[in-house]
Every structure is written in C-alpha cells, then in structure tokens.
Amino acid sequence: MTPEEESRLVRLEELVAHQQAAIEDLSRQLTDAWKDREKLRRELARLSDRFEELEDGADAPSANQKPPHW
C-alpha cells in the first residue's frame, strides 16, 4: 500500500468514526425528544380532560354567549 493510499484510508476511517458518533448522538437525541413528546401529549390530554370537567361544572355562561343585559 502506498503512503497516499494509507493516508487516504486513515482519513476515511476517521470520517466513518466521526459519522458513527454523530449518528449515535442524533439517535439518542431523537429518543429523548420522542419521550418528551409523549410526556407532553399525556399532560395535554390530562389538562384537556380537567378543563372540560371545570367547564361542565361552571355556572357561568359560555364565553361565546352575550350577557343577559345586552
């Protein structure tokens, strides 16, 4: 193997190693983001249910209705 070929091979191996590390990092970030998304989705569903419960139990007129004196 010539020195040029060996140098090129070393550069390619370094590039592959950096790309592999980047892919692993991105995969970890994607997994974390997916977990956060699911947590937020569950929290939104819980808050939506709670809001509906409060809205159903409220004696006040709906926000879309005009007050009776209009």
Image: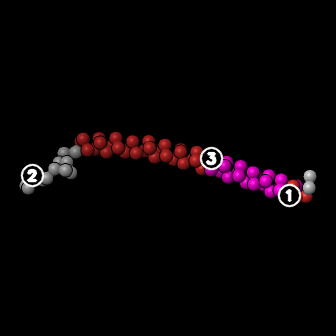
Give the residue pinned by disc 1: 7
Q: Camera-side residue: 38 or 2?
A: 2
User: Residue 17: x, y in percent?
Assistant: 75, 51
- Name the residue at 60% across, 50% down: 29
Choose mark 3 or mark 1, whichever is in front: 1
Badge nearest the viewer, 2 or 3: 3
Q: Residues within 10 Å of mark 3 (few under 14, many from 20)?
A: few
Residue under the image location 87 percent in, 55 percent down = 5
26 falls in the magenta region: yes
Side of 41 where 17 appears, left or right: right
Q: Earlier in the sequence, mark 3 or mark 1?
A: 1
Q: Is the C terminus in the top left, top right, bottom left or bottom right quadrant?
A: bottom left
Q: Amino acid at mark 1?
A: Ser
Identify the mark nearer the N-term, 2 or 3.
3
Q: Helix, strand, or loop for circle 3?
A: helix
Residue 68, label in figure? 2
- Residue 29 lies left or right of residue 57; in this view the side is right
- Element under disc 1: helix
Residue at image location 79% in from the left, 53% down from the top: 12
- State the CA–CA distance, disc 3 to disc 1: 30 Å
The vertical placement of 39 against 9, above or below, is: above
Residue occupied by mark 3: 27
- Magenta stretch holds residue 23: yes
Q: Position of residue 58 (x, y in %)?
A: 22, 45
Q: Main SS type for the magenta part?
A: helix
Magenta span of residues: 6-27
Disc on the earlier residue, 1 or 2: 1
Badge 3 amino acid: Ser
Question: Would you say the residues marked 3 and 1 are in contact, meaning their CB atoms lie under 8 Å apart?
Answer: no
Q: Return the residue nearer the eye: 9 or 28.
A: 9
